[in-house]
Amino acid sequence: MIKLIELRKLVKVSQFLALLLLSSASHAQDATFIDNVLTLPKATVGEAAYALELGLSVNQGNYEFGVLAAAEIPFTGTEGASVFDGAVLRVPTVDVGGTNYSLDLALISGDPIIFRLSSYAEVAAPTPTALAQATALFDESIETQIVQGKCIVCHKVGLLANDSGLLFASTSQGSAATNLGAFANYLNGSEAARTRILSMVTGVGHTGGQQMNAGDEQHQALGEMLRLLLEHQAGI
């Protein structure tokens, strides 16, 4: 088992390299594998944490990793970290050639410290949340084409739709987030509000008249974005 004092003895890198490791640990938690070097911005041993660089070598067909550099960093928990349990260093995700893998590295030597790849598995990309999907769709197909291209003519403070409950901001830095929030507030978890919006934009009970045809590309995009917002609000 690697004791903390043993790992501290590994800190023989220059101050410059240590600072680089600490910097990477403060800005990212994802492990990387570049030029046969596995960089772990955060690896925990008990309640201590380290930034590590492990060098890959192939020994009789086995993939082995030796410690190239190490620097102690503040311990803030194990979330997102590689974790050493005394026998196996578990790396939750590392990008290798554009594909993410989880790795189990078994300790085979304590002096020098050497890990051997014992197992690996491809890590499926997480499914974007409903809010993330709604935001992406809004930015791509709704903010410019629908909100700024159609709605803003009336749905703005002081204009014709001032009392509609659905007001937007003109194009500016942050306007997309503001306008997506306006839709979310108007919906407030109500499917009826979604139906009302989709009906009114086709001209039904809408002072501003018809802005799109039911079922056309823009109408479908708007409907899907609103559905995703409702899904998010429902906690699905």
Image: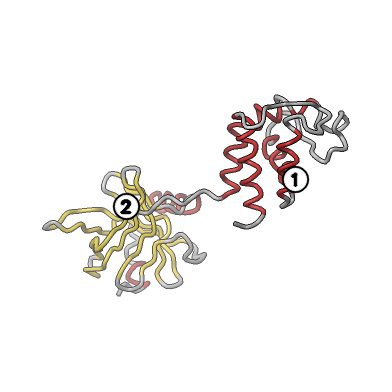
Tags 2 and 1 touching, CB below 8 Å: no
Q: Judge the density around disc 1: few (<14), some (14-19), many (≥20) Cα neighbours within 10 Å.
A: some
Reply above or below: 222 against 231.
above
Q: Amino acid at mark 2?
A: Leu
Which residue is drawn at the image coordinates 26% and 53% (left, top)?
55
Image x and y of residue 68, in percent: 29, 55
Q: Residues within 10 Å of mark 2 (few under 14, many from 20)?
A: many
Q: Residue furthest left?
A: 60
Kind of residue at disc 1: Ala
Asked which quadrant contains residue 142, the reply is top right
Q: In the rendered image, which quarter contains the N terminus?
A: bottom left
Question: Tag 1's secondary structure?
Answer: helix
Answer with the quarter of the image where residue 110 lies: bottom left
- Horizontal side of 197 relative to 86 (left or right) equals right
Residue 193, numbered circle: 1
The residue lying at 50 percent from left, 66 percent from top is 77
Between 105 and 146, the one lying in front of the other is: 146
Left or right, 220 with respect to 7, comes to right
Residue position marked by numbered label 2 in the rendering: 38
Q: Quadrant of the C terminus?
A: bottom right
Where residue 88 sits, quadrant-wise, is bottom left
Alpha carbons under labels 2 and 1: distance apart: 51 Å
Relative height, residue 206 to residue 195 (above, below):
above
- The color scheme shown is secondary structure
Residue 59: x and y, percent? 14, 57
The residue nearer to you, when weighing 105 against 197, is 197
